[in-house]
Image (tube, rainbow, N blue to C red):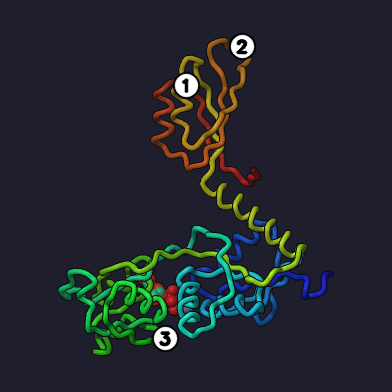
Amino acid sequence: MEPSAQRIKIAVQKSGRLTDHSIDLLERCGLKVTKSKDQLFCFGENMPIDLLLVRDDDIPGLVSDDVCDLGIVGLNVVEEKRFASEADGRPARFKQVFELDFGHCRLSIAGPEETAYDDLESLNNTRIATSYVGLLNNFLSKNGIDAEAVYFSGAVEIAPRLGRAEYICDLVSTGSTLKANGLRELDVLLESEAVIIQTEKPLGADKQALVDKILQRLDGVLQVRESKYIMLHAPKSALAEIHELLPGTEAPTVLRLDGSDDKVAVHAVCRENVFWETLENLKAAGASSLLVLPVEKMLD
Ligand code: PRP
Ligand code: ZN
């Protein structure tokens, strides 16, 4: 077994929206892990990769300080750390290396439903409650707005009712938290999703090669999520039209059908989901015996 300095350490959210999906993605890349008794550590059985399960807000700091090589965390948390560190005069030392296309949400300004809000100018001389002071202050100064960020570590949505702020700046995903608190979304500061960050300190050739391999596998995992393998029979005369109708396909395979002169079999990887409408359009164009299969792995 490799000495621990040679193992890659990835910081992952301990319990929250990103946890299951983060671990699931790594497992789809071939990693097998066992969780420690205290649930704070996952040991990689078949690759020199271990997971540290921590609070999401701590992840950028752990990567910046080289305690972990990589971190999987929301862009909102990453950017907040970046602005907060800059404001402290100690720039964060991590870089974003991958967008994971899950955990989509946005950081927005919201206010009580009855608030008269025209545009950002309406925020002048108000108080805005948030856990994202760095991002908010950056946004306000960039737009020349003079408002006060009031720090709340959680339950930001109750600040207006407590009389502590006129507005809030918080994450919105489904919007149900805002609705439940009589608030409406007014402006978006940041569109967020889960990303992978890596320490800026060079990892050394072996570790970097393994990181590159994992990122390449992740690329494949994300691609196959949407991809389908489609098989159908088609009259030769309809091939051009059928190719046009196949979503996200470069060159389909065309095969001879035994005992048929005018019909061929068409097989293609579609890099987009194949919906019923597409199948119906293909059938209308002359296709028959349509079959759509999931794709499990892909390597370009
Ligand atoms: C966020 C945010 C809201 C909620 C919004 O908290 O602070 O409370 O999600 O989601 P909705 O629009 O689907 O209702 P989260 O659960 O991510 O916890 P954290 O920010 O404290 O880590
Ligand atoms: Zn959090």
Total numbered labels placed on residues in the image: 3
Compared to residue 119, the image places residue 267 above or below, namely above
Residue 285 lies in quadrant: top left
Residue 275 lies in quadrant: top left
- Where is ligand 1, by quadrant? bottom left
* Mark 1 touches mark 2? (CB < 8 Å): no
Q: Which residue is mark 3?
A: 153
Q: Nearer the viewer, residue 71 or 257?
A: 71
Q: Which residue is mark 2?
A: 259
For the residue carrying disc 1, how many other residues have a C-alpha within 10 Å: few (<14), some (14-19), or many (20+)?
few
- Tell me, for residue 240, which label it has, or none: 1
Numbered disc 2: secondary structure: loop
Q: Amino acid at mark 3?
A: Ser
Q: Earlier in the sequence, mark 1 or mark 2?
A: 1
* Horizontal side of residue 257 vs 128, given as left or right: right
Which residue is painted at 72% across and 72% down in the image? Answer: 43
Q: Amino acid at mark 1?
A: Ala
Q: Amino acid at mark 2?
A: Gly
* Horizontal side of residue 122 vs 198, given as left or right: left
Q: Earlier in the sequence, mark 3 or mark 2?
A: 3
Residue 13, x across and y down, in percent = 56, 74
For the residue carrying disc 3, how many other residues have a C-alpha within 10 Å: few (<14), some (14-19), or many (20+)?
few
Alpha-carbon span between mark 1 and mark 3 = 59 Å
Residue 208, x across and y down, in percent = 71, 63
